[in-house]
Image (tube, grey):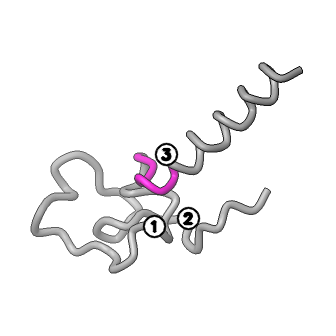
Amino acid sequence: MKTGFKETKKGCCGTGYLETSFMCNVISKTSPNHSDHLFWDSIHPSEAAYKYLGNFDDAQIRGWVKA
């Protein structure tokens, strides 16, 4: 399934491999385009990922309701 994310193996925050919680904060370096990333840090989905999942779930539920 194509999702449109350019980076799926590391997060947008810090190095993207290990940082969680306080490691990603206002002084942490982040990628310039957050919407290209599936994950914000090493474990938390980005806002773009949640939007994609929400739209996908909505379409699935609407399909079930119409059936």
Residue 14 percent across, percent down from the top left:
28, 69
On the image, which quarter does residue 2 sit in? bottom right
Residue carrying label 2: 9
Dot 1 falls on a residue whose secondary structure is helix
Left/right of residue 46 with respect to residue 26 in the rendered view: right
Does 37 appear in magenta? no
Residue 13 point in image, percent of width and height: 31, 65
Mark 3 vs mark 1, CA separation in Å:
11 Å
Q: Quadrant of residue 25?
A: bottom left
Q: Residues within 10 Å of mark 3 (few under 14, many from 20)?
A: some
Q: Nearer the viewer, residue 4 or 11?
A: 4
Residue where numbered disc 3 is placed: 50
Q: Are marks 3 and 1 in contact (CB under 8 Å)?
A: no
Left or right side of 50 for 64: right
Residue at horizontal 17 percent and vertical 69 percent from the top: 28
**Residue 56 placement (x, y as % from top left):** 67, 42
Which amino acid type corresponds to the residue marked 1 in the rendered image? Ser
Residue under the image location 65 percent in, 34 percent down: 57
Point out the residue furthest to the front here: 66
* Position above or below: 3 against 20: below
**Number of the label disc, if any, that sits on residue 15:** none
Disc 1 target residue = 35
What amino acid is labelled 3 in the image? Answer: Tyr
Magenta residues (range): 44-49
